Image (cartoon, rainbow, N blue to C red):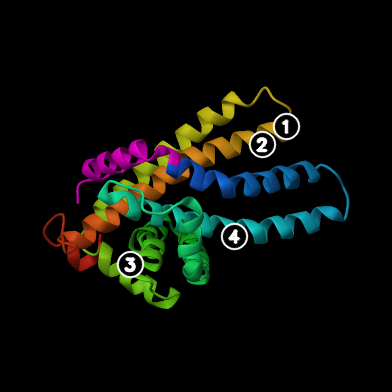
Amino acid sequence: MRIGDVLSEAWGLYKRFFGQFFLTALVVFVVLDLLAAVVDNASGNNTGANLFWALLGALISVIGYFWVQAALIETARDVRDGRADRSIGETYVAVRPRLPSAIIAGILAAIGIGIGLILLIIPGLFLLTIWSMVIPVVVIESRSAGEAFSRSRDVVRGNGWSVLGLIIVVFLLVAITSIIVRLIFSPLPNFIEVWLGSLLADSLTVPFAAAALTTAYFRLVGTGQEADEPGASAAVL
């Protein structure tokens, strides 16, 4: 799997179906980022409502984030044939049965990767690589949370360095774009800046990240997970 080929294909899908991707993300992030702005604004007040808003925001954010991620992966899968066969509402309905597995797998992966990065960076990067296809596997193959981890490792096997490189490049692109977008909103009042800045940044960047991840999944599966270099398959990376 070549990183440049994946990014080129993902960018092509993203540009051609920009409206579909952007609106799919927007309808959820408009709520999630509003909650984040409310929590951020409430944090300046020493009231008992802070804990309530923080817990409510965290719960809704977890559900909403994985739902929008699943929907964006399904959108990327849907438009690979050159047309969008589902409306945005139909896409969210289609992935709803897989949402519990996506949430469980996503949270477990985040905990494992986070611990790995805190203790030693290399184990965290290793887990980030072999578990990178967990959500696509859940959404596209309808796997359970338990099955998703071993299947993700099988998909990545032999292409670990390319997958890790792709993750790093996409992360940098998303981070730089998000910083630029939020700087544009920085002159506005804090609440508006946090809400609208995050909303536009998330609605622009998260769909591209999902398109790149989905494109990588199909390329890895399509190529039979052949190794990038001799001996790579033995150690996944």
Q: Amino acid at mark 2?
A: Val
Q: Which residues are magenta?
A: 1-19
Label 3, on which residue?
Answer: 152
The C terminus: image quadrant: bottom left
Q: CA distance from mark 1 to mark 4?
A: 24 Å
* Residue 133 falls in image quadrant: bottom left
Does 40 sit left or right of 107 as displayed? Answer: right
Residue 12 lies within the magenta run: yes
Gap between marks 2 and 4 measured at Cα: 19 Å
Q: Are marks 2 and 3 in contact (CB under 8 Å)?
A: no
200 versus 211 height, above or below: above
Could you tell me residue 88's position as x and y percent? 48, 51
Instruction: Give the numbered dot on residue 194.
Output: 2
Q: Secondary structure at mark 2?
A: helix
Pointer 4: what residue? 62
In the rendered view, would you say 222 is above or below 7?
below
- C-alpha separation, residue under disc 4 versus residue under disc 3: 21 Å
**Residue at image location 58% in from the left, 26% down from the top:** 183
State how far apart marks 1 and 3 are (Cα): 40 Å
Q: Amino acid at mark 4?
A: Val
